[in-house]
Image (cartoon, rainbow, N blue to C red):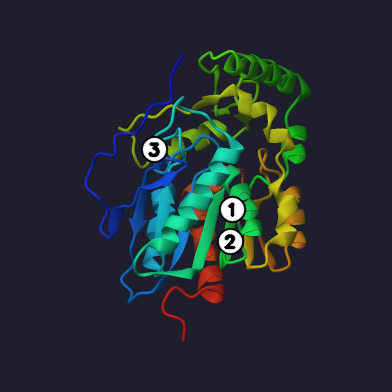
Amino acid sequence: MTMVARTDGGGPAEHGREDADFLSSGLRCAAWLYRPVLAPPVAAVVMAHGFGAVRIARLEAYASRLRAAGYAVLLFDYRHFGDSDGEPRGLLDIGRQRDDWQAAVAHARSLPGIDPDRIILWGTSFSGGHAIATAARDPRIAAVVAQVPHVSGLASALAVPFAHSLRLTALGLRDELGSRLGRSPRYVPSLGAPGDLAALTSSDAMEGHAILRMDHPDREWSDHVAARIVLRVPFYSPGWAAGRVRCPLLIQATRDDEVTPARAAQRAARRAPRGELQLYDGGHFAPYAGELFERMVAGQVAFLVRTVPPGRPS
């Protein structure tokens, strides 16, 4: 079985970027801090990837754009993934990932030059749901950007053919039972084409797989996750927490999304007291590159500049 490998962290650091690791429940989360060319204190964006993905999978592109707009950015890998610590590798645990978000926010607030009352959360796909849930629990969060977010476990589950769900459930049950007996995880690919035995399947998944790896074609990381997570995703609906998010919340959805359906995202945006929705043509992986990336990141920057200006408040 292919294990989930740590990325090597090699290569020269991007200008304006520094290592900023932090601890979550005693384990190291690898992080980068992007500092803008603005007089402190500045607003900071806390950012992490979606289902089974790592920070070098196109998130550097978003972080660089936000830095250019004047924001500091703390971009991190979850425990058990990427450059972060944690065994077994590839363990996608919802509670642990949400703990990592809380630890990342606390770390960002502690950093010199960062305004602790202007912390913004940025999530995509599965982490978009985490960002909403985290903001619902932390009234100090200044704004949230949730791109093609997972907001409804039921909506995502109903988008999957029944026969495929049965195959995934059987594998998830074997992994769950094995974990209770102290066995190593049974893994399942994070992404697959329709008909593949993978946690997330869609007609644009293989194109998305290539896009997520485009910035680092020579870097290897496995996209497998411990299969027990498929038992929990249908019951994870952070969109219900949107009603408790008091800060501005931007949800960006795509009309042809086969992974996180747009209708669920629209409902979450309406539920939020200060929710805004931007709806685009395209599938789940279209936002990560090309014209749609340009349009959506421009929408994110415009929303943030309007609601949480990056520099010193007047």
Mark-to-mark CA distance, 2 and 3:
24 Å
First in sequence: mark 3 vs mark 1: 3
Q: Label 3 amino acid?
A: Ser
Q: Are marks 3 and 1 in contact (CB under 8 Å)?
A: no
Q: Element at badge 1?
A: helix
**Residue 212 visible in the displayed image:** yes
- Characterize the local packing of mark 2: few (<14), some (14-19) or many (20 or more) Cα atoms within 10 angstroms: many
Q: At x 65% / y 45%, what residue is drawn?
A: 150
Q: At x 59% / y 23%, what residue is drawn?
A: 227
Foreground tag (2 vs 3): 3
- Characterize the local packing of mark 1: few (<14), some (14-19) or many (20 or more) Cα atoms within 10 angstroms: many
Q: Quadrant of residue 189?
A: top right
**In the image, is 73 to the left or to the right of 10?**
right
Relative image position of residue 184 (x, y in whole percent): 50, 15
**In the image, is 39 to the left or to the right of 156?**
left
First in sequence: mark 1 vs mark 2: 1
Relative image position of residue 19 (x, y in whole percent): 30, 50
Q: At x 21% / y 47%, what residue is drawn?
A: 12
Q: Label 2 amino acid?
A: Val
Q: Element at badge 2?
A: strand
The image's mark for residue 51 is none
Per the image, the residue denoted by label 1 is 131
Per the image, the residue denoted by label 3 is 84
